Amino acid sequence: MSLMDHLRELRQRILYSLVAAFVAFLVCWYFVEPVFNFLTRPLLDVLPEGSTAMYTTLPEAFFTRMYIAFILGLFVASPAIFYQIWAFISPGLYEEEKHFIMPVAFISAIFFILGGVFCYYIVFHYAFQFFMSFVTAEIQAMPKISDYLDFVLKLILAFGFIFEMPIFAFFLSRMGIVTAAKMRRARRYAVLIIFIVAAILTPPDVVSQLLMAVPMLILYEISILVAALFGKKEAPKPEEEDEDDYEEDEYEDEDADDYDEDDVNETARDKGKAQAAATIAANTAQEKDKSDTKPSDKSLAKASEGDA
């Protein structure tokens, strides 16, 4: 396929995704009121007597429900949207990649839903109680409903992505970016960060912090296990080791040659000194012998006088 054919197909897939999202939005608009009550229930349960949520502008109630229907519609239409993405990229994938992408997509959806459920039933309960503990009789809590829903939906989305940690570990380990060994070495820092986040988002009691921190620690350990099972295995590098051994042997040979040359030079100097000393000694001995055998002038004169 040419580049223009790919662009036409991409435009078609995007159009199908938008149509699916719009249809899902219309369906969710019909159920927006029960969903609205479901999302605001954690706040209403912890509001003290005399406090209430409120709207500050006239169209805020309408646009808040549209916002909920839009977000919910994206979730409902996500299977169709993911199918369009899959249909666009699948021709360029190998058979092996096609086999594991669908199970991974299904598992990631399950983890995302678990993250949202955990956030709604555990985090909201303790976090909202903690926030409401600062309300006094003189200062009443009157949360703005649009800000509250924006906060709630973002937090649900954040916990959904946090629960995708094993999926991220799977892909990063397959690409060789992270390994199980690296994650084990960073465990102490991960534990510290997890408990700091838990201490910020929960009331200052140990039970609340553990209710939030323990699932995140379990997810981190699951991520380590996933990286160990599916991570990219590092192949041994015998060639580099051989080169290192060869370089070490070469350095050792050069050092040995240097030592041999030094020994030879030192031996040659010692031999030269010995030969010079021997030559000097021989010359001295010869001169001494000559001096002993050669008659002196006085002895020769006496000998001549005796003959006369």
Image (cartoon, rainbow, N blue to C red):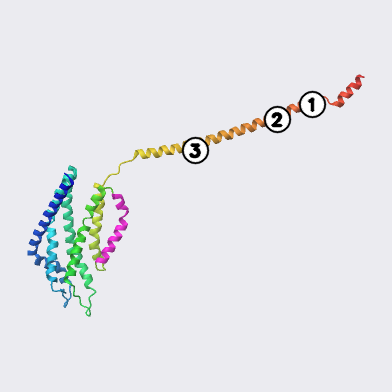
Q: Which residue is at a point 52% across and 36% down the rendered structure image?
A: 259
Considering the whole magenta stretch, tell me its main secondary structure.
helix
Q: Position of residue 196 (x, y in %)?
A: 29, 63
Q: Nearer the viewer, mark 3 or mark 1?
A: 3
Mark toward the start of the polypeptide (3 vs 2): 3
Reply above or below: 227 against 260.
below
Residue at mark 3 = 255
Residue ranking furthest to the right: 308
Q: CA distance from mark 1 to mark 2?
A: 17 Å
Tag 3 secondary structure? helix
Which quadrant is the N terminus positioned in? Answer: top left
Give the residue pinned by disc 1: 292
Q: Position of residue 169 (x, y in %)?
A: 24, 52
On screen, residue 46 versus residue 175, left or right, reads left
| Mark with earlier residue (3, 1) | 3
User: What amino acid is found at the position of numbered circle 3 in the picture?
Assistant: Asp
Query: Residue at horizontal 11%, vertical 58%?
Result: 21
Region of the chain picked out in magenta, as a range: 177-201
In the image: residue 1, left or right of residue 177: left
Residue sitting at the far top: 307
Classify mark 1: helix, strand or loop.
Answer: helix
Q: Earlier in the sequence, mark 1 or mark 2?
A: 2
Residue at (23, 62) in percent of width and height: 212
Q: Which residue in the structure is indicated by mark 2? A: 281
Cα distance between the residues tagged 3 and 1: 55 Å
Location of residue 107 in the rendering, given as x and y in whole percent from the top left corner: 17, 52
**Residue type, mark 1 in image:** Asp
Quarter of the image for the C terminus: give it.
top right
- SS label for mark 2: helix
